[in-house]
Amino acid sequence: MKLHNLRPAEGSTHKEKRLGRGEASGKGGTSTKGNKGGQSRAGYKSKMAHEGGQMPIQRRVPKRGFKNPDRVEYRVFNLGQIEQLAEKYGITEVSVENLYVNNLISRTDKVKILANGEIKTKLTFKVNALSEKAKSAIEAAGGSVEIVK
């Protein structure tokens, strides 16, 4: 067998019908495209979201709400959670890097500390944001706070 001998299997290929080549072909005139109009012509393309005259879904459904493009999403930790994590992982510094290393946040997360719960351990905090109550509770326990951007 050589490259010049290769052929498709018997019956696997069919001759292409030549549309619109006279009435005798059986497919002349309209070339099986129905009657007149844009859809029977070359280059026809329907408009995006066109639903055949029915009111399109983007007009049927009412508009709701607002997405603020400047919103900053924080991964929130409460002081009670931090106390448990410090015991479990032996953490003395709560920083974005430490939390990432212990698989508690993803690489791009920003961390915010809130004051729910109690903290008794002296810890150093290097986080993106924290509440005033949390700051005062940390400093009362002997810890320090640093805001990282």
Image (cartoon, rainbow, N blue to C red):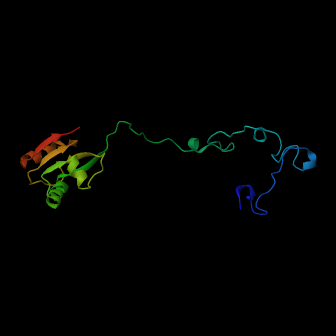
Q: Looking at this rendering, what residue extends furthest in the front direction?
A: 2
Q: Looking at this rendering, what residue extends furthest in the right direction?
A: 24
Residue 57: image location, x then y, percent:
58, 45
Q: In which quarter of the view is residue 6 placed? A: bottom right
Residue 29: image location, x then y, percent:
88, 43
Residue 57 drawn above or below residue 80: above
Residue 28: image location, x then y, percent:
88, 45
Residues 14 and 46: in front is: 14
Report the number of numbered marks: 0
Residues 77 and 106: in front is: 106
Residue drawn 12% across and 52% down? Answer: 92
Q: Is residue 31 left or right of residue 120?
A: right
Q: In which quarter of the view is residue 67 placed? A: top left
Q: Quadrant of the N terminus?
A: bottom right
Residues 54 and 8: in front is: 8
Residue drawn 20% across and 50% down? Answer: 98
Residue drawn 13% across and 42% down? Answer: 145
Residue 75: image location, x then y, percent:
28, 48
